């Protein structure tokens, strides 16, 4: 599951990340959501604010457990998340862009960004997790939150 995002974590790293996720809603700067299939948790999706290239942005990331991948679950979760982030972005002094930074080698996540209507800006070196000093070679995908048009592209098409 962590192949494209730095590999396995120690128990201490995992607990620290979990504490950060739990604290996000209190800050008003983001939120982590469980992805459910019926009553079963099959993944997660989140957004949070961060600084990127001299701009305050929202960043998103997701995961779906392997047995549930390829069923459109991440696309449904992404669509729902975009609606939530668009609402948050409508408040004063909030970011106007949502970015995703999947590894250049993570074909399914890059395809999902395209399917959700993100625009590929190009490859970049991206620090993940923030403050770790670890750089990931990622694609920078951006969605303009002021554009409320639903995605209309099929698979493999990039704008």
Image (spheres, helix red, strand yellow):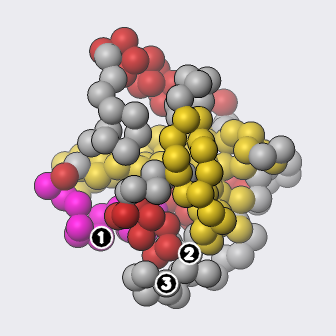
Q: Residue furthest top?
A: 12
Residue under numbered circle 3:
157
- Please identify the quarter of the rendering in which residue 13 is found: top left
**Vertically, is 27 above or below 56?**
above
User: Mark 2 against mark 3, which lies toward the viewer?
Assistant: 3
Residue 82, percent from left and from top: 56, 63
Q: Residues within 10 Å of mark 1 (few under 14, many from 20)?
A: few
Q: Residue at x 67, y 41 (%)?
A: 49
Query: Residue 109: which numbered mark, if any?
Result: none
How far separated are the C-alphas under marks 1 and 2?
Answer: 15 Å
Q: Residues within 10 Å of mark 3 (few under 14, many from 20)?
A: few
How far separated are the C-alphas under marks 2 and 3?
Answer: 10 Å
For the residue labelled by badge 2, is the local secondary structure a helix, a strand or a loop? loop
Of pointers 3 and 1, the one earlier in the residue sequence: 1
Foreground residue, 136 or 10? 136
Q: Residues within 10 Å of mark 2 (few under 14, many from 20)?
A: many
Q: Main secondary structure of the magenta part?
A: helix
Per the image, is 54 magenta? no
**Vertically, is 155 above or below 88?**
below
Left or right: residue 67 versus residue 134 is: left
For the residue labelled by badge 3, is the local secondary structure a helix, a strand or a loop? loop
The magenta-colored residue range is 67-79
Foreground residue, 48 or 70? 70
Residue 158, percent from left and from top: 55, 80
Residue under numbered circle 1:
72
Residue under numbered circle 2:
117
- Please identify the quarter of the rendering in which residue 16 is found: top left
Q: Residue at x 55, y 35 (%)?
A: 135
Q: Residue at x 23, y 67 (%)?
A: 70
Residue 140, percent from left and from top: 60, 57
């Amino acid at each position: 599951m962590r192949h494209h995002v730095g590999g396995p974590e120690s128990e201490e790293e995992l607990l620290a990340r979990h504490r950060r996720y739990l604290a996000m809603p209190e800050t008003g700067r983001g939120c982590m959501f469980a992805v459910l299939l019926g009553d079963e948790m099959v993944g997660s999706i989140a957004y949070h604010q961060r600084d990127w290239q001299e701009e305050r942005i929202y960043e998103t990331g997701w995961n779906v457990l392997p047995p549930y991948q390829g069923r459109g679950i991440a696309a449904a979760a992404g669509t729902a998340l975009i609606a939530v982030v668009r609402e948050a972005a409508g408040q004063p002094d909030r970011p106007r862009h949502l970015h995703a930074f999947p590894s250049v080698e993570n074909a399914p996540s890059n395809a999902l960004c395209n399917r959700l209507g993100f625009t590929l800006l190009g490859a970049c070196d991206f620090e993940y997790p923030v403050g770790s000093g670890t750089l990931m070679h990622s694609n920078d995908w951006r969605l303009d939150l002021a554009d409320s048009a639903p995605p209309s592209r099929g698979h493999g098409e990039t704008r």
